[in-house]
Image (tube, rainbow, N blue to C red):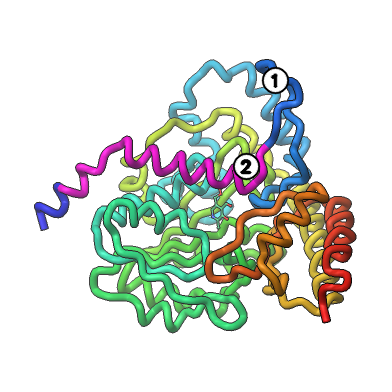
Amino acid sequence: MAGERGMTTQVSRRTLLRASSIALTGTLLAAGGTVRAGGHDGAARRPAGVRMAANENPYGPSAAARAAIRDSVEDIWQYAFGQEQALRRLIAEAEDLSPEHVLITAGSAEAIQLAGLVYGLERGTMVTARTTFTLTTDYAQMIGCKVVSVPLDDTLTHDLPAMAAAITPDTSLFYVCNPNNPTGTMVPGSELLPFVSEVARRTTVLVDEAYLDLEDDMAAHTAVPLVAAGEDVIVTRTFSKLHALAGLRIGYALAQPEVVARLENFRMGVLNLAGLRAAEASLQDREWQQLSRNRIRTARELTNSWIDELGLRRAASHGNFVFFDTRAPAADFAAAMRERGFLLGRPYADYPEWSRISLGTVDQMRAFADAARGYFAGKLG
Ligand SMILES: Cc1ncc(COP(=O)(O)O)c(C=O)c1O
């Protein structure tokens, strides 16, 4: 056992850094990225098409967040050492927790990778769904942890009983993405909370709530009450989706204070000062959050309706994306849409004919609906 731990800590920093840069590059390629308009340093970058691969929020941040970013320029020469305390307190207050329960991170990706690392070092097993977001378990796998991934059910929702059955005495972490990426399906709080509470007696549970703030009744579904009750549960959230601050990299984890301290020990970077200020402003602008929520819902309903009209199957999405069955290789659909100026992501191994569409603006989704109707015309019997 001591030998195993020794081996684990020998995993080089280079391996980890290489792995995270590969993951990032993959995401950027999938998102289509941008191309330089000029070619000189600092030249404006023009998008190579409408970005529909990374579940971003193309409306951009609130006026309050934009002002906070502009104001932060005066202080941007400073390291943000300790400057997360104001945001930490705001989040703690909003969630009825102490600041010690809150870890502010560089996007929620940092929080879930930290969990992958810290619990992965135990080199037991991690239980997750298939297909889901894999950042936690990919990280754990690279350092020698075994990942058990349990297929989604017929509605593309987490199969909780089957996942519970996969827990063994050496399971170090149980990951649930709610709503799930890439399907967008959500397990309601009334079902999820008693389940997670039960599982947390056996192993640590991470509930990834990156998309939960898109729900009007988020309070009915969040697993945070379990953190407040002292259970062995980590909840992660982000400012990248509803708040449209993906490029400023701010997220957080809510967990027991000793878990927060344990995760924080492994942090690799220093937080982003402009991002912290923007997140503080955005978190307090409830009215704008509702506007953002409504716009995403409109774009989603519009997208659901052409998919339903064409009689294609789709998952019941609660995210800012829709997962649907193209009835042919999803790569063909993506290639056809790319020609029409829409940049979709890669297909998913278990669902090669399903495409995940990250929602653009309502106008972009109208244009996308026309393009998709054109693609499917004459193709569906
Ligand atoms: C389920 C899920 N969790 C976490 C993240 C990470 O987002 P961020 O690091 O921007 O908070 C994403 C990003 O797409 C996601 O889909």
The chief SS type of the magenta part is: helix
Amino acid type indicated by mark 2: Ala
Q: Which numbered marker is on residue 39?
A: 1
Q: Which residue is drawn at 73% across and 61% down?
A: 333
Q: Can residue 231 be seen in this view?
A: no
Q: Which of 243 and 280 is in front in this view?
A: 243
Callouts 1 and 2 close, C-beta under 8 Å = no
Is 82 situated left or right of 337 in this image?
Answer: left
Question: Element under label 2?
Answer: helix
Q: How crowded is mark 2: few (under 14 residues within 10 Å), some or many (20 or more)?
A: many
Q: Position of residue 153 (x, y in %)?
A: 54, 81
Q: Distance between the residues labelled 1 and 2?
A: 25 Å
Q: Which residue is drawn at 57% across and 66% down?
A: 180
Q: Which numbered marker is on residue 246?
A: 2
What is the quadrant of the C terminus in the image? bottom right
Question: Element under label 1?
Answer: loop
Q: Which numbered marker is on residue 21?
A: none
What's drawn in magenta, residue-wise? 7-33
Q: Which residue is drawn at 44% across and 52% down?
A: 112
Give the mark, 1 or 2, whose residue is nearer the N terminus.
1
Find out whether residue 19 is within the magenta segment. yes
Q: Is residue 111 above or below residue 352?
A: above
Q: Nearer the viewer, residue 324 or 274?
A: 324
On whether ligand 1 comes within 8 Å of the CB at mark 1, the answer is no
Is 279 situated left or right of 63 in this image?
Answer: left
Q: Nearer the viewer, residue 346 or 114?
A: 346
What is the quadrant of the N terminus in the image? bottom left
